[in-house]
Image (cartoon, rainbow, N blue to C red):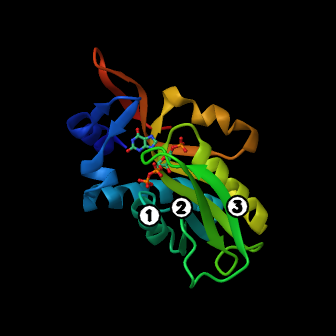
Amino acid sequence: MQSLVEAIKEQGVILPGGFLKVDGLVNHQLLPHLTREMGVRFAEHFAPLRPSKVVTIEVSGIAPAISAAMELGVPMVYARKKKPLTMKEPTFTAESVSRTKGGAVNLFISSEFLGPGDRVVVIDDFLASGGTLRALSRMIAESGAALLGFGCVVEKEFEEGRLHLADLNVPIHTLANIVRMSEEEGIVVEVGR
Ligand SMILES: O=P(O)(O)OC[C@H]1O[C@H](OP(=O)(O)OP(=O)(O)O)[C@H](O)[C@@H]1O
Ligand SMILES: O=c1[nH]c(=O)c2nc[nH]c2[nH]1
């Protein structure tokens, strides 16, 4: 997605520890025209697989996921990081590590909204190590739903998440790919794959 690549070049900031700050377009402020185009691009890619549901994880996955779900015309469910008292049991749960806040978090999705009849596309903001997508894939498997694909807004190729998830045999589509980044070279970013 060329417009996203341009926005990352303009606004992206390299932080210590291999983190990319894109708070002005993905993680704090959202730009409606970019978020809408993300949804269009994901929908173009995944519509032929006939998904019945989009699944994501709070908090930064929600915007691109609802944009994709609107284009696909299907519901969107987001995994919660704390189980609310309204959530109906049984729930599917898995542990993941919050990359930007640190520490392990438990994820919860209610069986009320995910089950054996579902055909799921997972959308998230970042693909880094792949740990979060792995945790979501476990919950989806437990629910009996079919996992059709992963879509992420930004891939950090140098963290090799795509390789770590290869055993799942699930197609991965990303909109922008950070090939590498350093103070010397800046952010080397290309259209996703
Ligand atoms: O591929 P991984 O190594 O798992 O990294 C990607 C995950 O890290 C971030 O989650 P985080 O909880 O840090 O942020 P958020 O609350 O903004 O969604 C991001 O939103 C992805 O879900
Ligand atoms: O804002 C973010 N920047 C990153 O580099 C990153 N990696 C995983 N999750 C992330 N979130």
In the rendered image of this protein, does residue 150 appear above or below residue 40? above
How far apart, in angstroms, are the residues tagged by discs 3 and 1? Answer: 17 Å
Q: Element under label 3?
A: helix
Q: Residues within 10 Å of mark 2 (few under 14, many from 20)?
A: many
Circles 1 and 2 in contact, beta carbons < 8 Å: yes
Q: Which residue is mark 3?
A: 139
Residue at 35% x, 36% y: name it.
Answer: 20
Q: Element under label 1?
A: helix
Q: Of the residues under marks 3 and 2, which one precedes in the sequence?
A: 2
What is the quadrant of residue 186 in the picture?
A: top left
Q: Residues within 10 Å of mark 3 (few under 14, many from 20)?
A: many
Numbered circle sitting on residue 56: 2
What is the quadrant of residue 13 in the picture?
A: top left
Circles 3 and 2 in contact, beta carbons < 8 Å: no
Amino acid type of the residue tagged 2 in the rendering: Thr
Point out residue 31 in the picture as x, y percentages from the top left corner.
25, 57
Amino acid type of the residue tagged 1 in the rendering: Ile
Numbered circle sitting on residue 123: none
Numbered circle sitting on residue 62: 1
**Residue nearer the viewer, 190 or 182:** 182
In the rendered image of this protein, does residue 88 appear above or below residue 130? below
